Structure formats: structure tokens, C-alpha cells
Image (cartoon, rainbow, N blue to C red):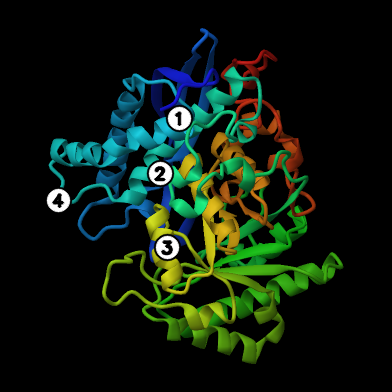
Amino acid sequence: MSPKTTDVRILEVTVTFESVGFRFPLKFGGRTINETKLINAAVDVETRDGRRATGHGSMPVGNVWAWPSEVTAAADSERAMMQYAEGVAELFASFPDYGHPLEIQYAVGTEFQHQADRVGRDLEMDEILPSLAQLVAVSPIDAAFHDAYGRVHRSCCFNLLSADYCNDDLSFYLDDQFSGEFPNQYTRREPVARLPLYHLVGALDPLSPAEAAGLTEDGLPHALGDWIAADGLTHLKIKLSGDDLDWDVSRVLAVEQTSGEAQQNRDCSKWFYSCDFNEKCDSAEYVLEFLNRVRDQRPGAFDRIQYIEQPTSRDLRSASAVRMHDVAKIKPVVIDEALVDYDALLACRELGYSGVALKACKGLSESLFAASAAQKFGMFLCVQDLTCPGLSWLQSCSLAARIPGITAIEGNARQYCPAPNSKWARLYPDLFEISDGTVNTGRLSEHGLGFHTGTSRINGAVGDSS
């Protein structure tokens, strides 16, 4: 790496874990989760001239999504991802060189697979952490590193992505199409003022008050219509089965009926859906038939569908990998679970995918690379969620606010696991307490990740952790 005066080195990395219970089960892709654990990371850095700062990051383990398996039990995959995060923290902490977070993360990344192999041996597992699980486990450390880098330079880290700070251009990470280009060309210098919130309609979520009867009253809505009224929602993400066409069509039509009534009560005439099959469809024909049936039965519901999310398997190497060209002619089809690196993005484009789902849980560094490539190739962009509460939700908001072309952001921890939100909502109420269907992302322009992450201020003090 060529030396810059803005380079930093890592002094220490710590990782801790926090259990989070769900107020209501979340079902997706045939799997149901009732609780999760957060990986919380802190990274201490030092500049060449001796200035120091600490950054923080957080992310749910998300093993049920990142590592669905018929071989490894969920408790075992969760334990493996947590141990993996601890091992990667040691790798970062022992990295000797100075550099930009993008460069150091990329260099340390050459050891990620070796670390996964080591965890597999230590735990005597029958399978190794897949790439997506590795990304999720690393993401809070990566976020904390970018946060620390911004804090030590007393700037938002999204404004430290030019040639003035980065030693390598994007061609080093992607290919020669990006020669001479840096991530600052694909990010905003100021966060977008507001973003609509995509609310999740899970497969078990009640649509009507009758379906919500008997659920524990805790001051938050349960039924979809009540959520729409309370939060002024205009964007709904619908979880579908992918292997029961009649149910999928009926579910969208039921959501259309419920949301139509709720929107009429608040005099709203414009709202949107996204449809998430969580890889369960076995063919493009399934998706085409789904769209045709919805269009035939409720044209308005069809028009409201903004995009289709990863309908078929994340396994791009399979000879039977499904081509999405015909579906993409009708609606944008975005890659999610399959998107683990630049090669995967190129492979998905070959298969006809026309959009990219960015996720903070895949790491800020990897998200910046994917966002740059997607914009270069003219692809549809969205930012999605991993049921991220508290700090991890703010990370996702900051990412969405800085990427041109993002029209909405998904956020559902307030529905399923809101407890960790409370301490952060005191600092940033308009990012957690939704009333008009939007999130006030415009305020995410502070040092680091764009908001204060230091524990002193969260607990009541006003000092900056840098």
C-alpha cells in the first residue's frame, strides 16, 4: 500500500454478544425465528501522527438466513458464526500495516476462508461457514473500522472515499472498467433528506384485527392495517412461500385488500410492494405465473409491485441455475442471498438479474463495491434488512442515505425485536419512531458512520468517543 498521511492502523478489536428476543415470530423461506444474538464490535485505530479514535458496529448473527442448512443445526451455525467473529477480530487486530479501511479489510479478507476452515475443525462440523455467513459475522467489525476512521479524521466516513484517502482505486477490487475511479464517485456527499420505510409483512403476520386476536398487548400494533395507520406506511415487503402458487397469489391479494382499506382511511392513493420468495421458487416460470395471476385478478396490486427479490437458489454454480431475463422484462429482479462478491454480481447479471439488494450485514466495504458496480451497470438498487435493531439499523440507514438511486429502506426490527432500539431512539427519535412512513436520514452526517456510536453519549453523556 502506498503511504498516505490519512492512513490508520488497528490497535485493538473487541467483540461481544447480546441476546435479543422477538415479540412475534418471523417466518421466511420456510424457517421461523424467535430470537437472535447481536455481534457488537469496537475498533481502536491510530493515525501515523498518533491520533486515536474508537469506532463501533453491530449486526445480528442472522445464521438462519445466512446459513440455512439441512446438515447443521441452527444453534450450531450460530455458535460457529460467533466464534468466527472472534477469530476475525484477532486477524484485524494483528494486521501490522497502515491503510484505509477498504484496503485493510480487503487484505485481511484473504484469511477469511482459512478462519472458516479453522472454526469448522475446532467445532468438528460437517460443513464450513459459507461465504454469506462469513460476511455477516465480519460486518460489525468492518462497520466499526469505518466508524473509527471517520472519527479519527473528524468527518463522516462516507466523505473519506476519494483518492485523497484511498491508496487504491476501484479497479484493484473490481476490474479495469473502474480504473481511476473511487467510491466517492458512487456515493453522496450529503445524506438524502428522507427515505420511505419498507415494512415487512411476514408469512405469519396477522393482516386483520381478527387474526391478531389473542396476541400479547405490548403497546405496538400487530395487524397490518394498524401498522399502516400508526406509521403512515406506503411501502410493504411481502414474504411469500415460493412453492405454493395459490397461497402466494392469495397472500398478495389479501395484503392488497387490507392495505387498500387502511390507505383509504388515511386518504393515501399511492403505495408500493416488493415480493420476497427467499429462494424457494424452482423456476422463472413460477414467478411469471405469479405475476400474471396477480395482474389478471388485481391489476392495481400488480402495478404496486416495485421489484422481485431473489426468487430462486443462491447457488450460482449449479448447472440448473435459473435465468431471470423474462421476469426482468416485467419487474426488476434483485439479487440478495447470491450477492457475496463482485464475481457473484457479474454471474447474476449473466443470469438476467437486473437489480442489487445492498445490506449492511454484508459489510460496508462490500456494499460500497457492490453499489459502485450496480450504478456503473445501470442496475436497480435497494437497501434491505436483516431485522437490524439499534446500532445496526442506523448503519443500514446511513448506507442507504449515501447511495444514489435508493428509493426506500427496509427496516423491521421495530416490528419483531424493538427492545434494543429504545436507547438509540432517545438520540435519534425520527429514525426509530415512524409517523409519516419515512425515515429522517438527512441527519446522518455526524462523524464516523454518520451518527454517534460511543457508549458514553448513549448512556446520557454528550462527549464524543473520538
Q: Are marks 4 and 3 in contact (CB under 8 Å)?
A: no
- Residue 346's disc is 3
The disc labelled 4 sits on which kind of residue?
Answer: Asp
* Residue at 33% from the left image edge and 22% from the top image edge: 95
Residue underneath mark 4: 126
Q: Which residue is mark 2?
A: 136
Name which residue type carries label 3. Answer: Leu
As measured in the structure, the alpha-carbon distance from the residue carrying label 1 to the one carrying label 4 is: 27 Å
Residue type, numbered disc 2: Val
Relative to 205, is 19 on the left or the right?
Answer: left
Q: Residues within 10 Å of mark 1 (few under 14, many from 20)?
A: many
Residue at disc 3, secondary structure: helix
Of pointers 1 and 3, the one earlier in the residue sequence? 1
Quadrant of residue 12 within the rendered picture: top left
Sequence-first tag of 1 and 4: 1
Q: Is residue 406 visible?
A: yes
Q: Is residue 294 above or below residue 440?
A: below
Q: CA distance from mark 4 to mark 3?
A: 30 Å
**Label 1, on which residue?**
40
**Which tag is nearer the camera, tag 1 or tag 3?**
3
Residue 157 position within the rendered picture, expressed as x and y whole percent measured from the top left = 60, 31
Disc 1 element: strand
Q: Using a 10 Å C-alpha cutoff, classify the residue at mark 3 as few (fewer than 14 neighbours), some (14 to 19) or many (20 or more).
A: some
**Which of the two discs, 1 and 2, labels the residue nearer the N terminus?**
1
Measuring from the top left, give residue 331's x and y in whole percent.
59, 76
Looking at the rendered structure, the secondary structure element under dot 4 is loop
Q: Residues within 10 Å of mark 4 (few under 14, many from 20)?
A: few
Question: In the rendered structure, which disc, 4 or 3, sits on the residue that comes first in sequence?
Answer: 4
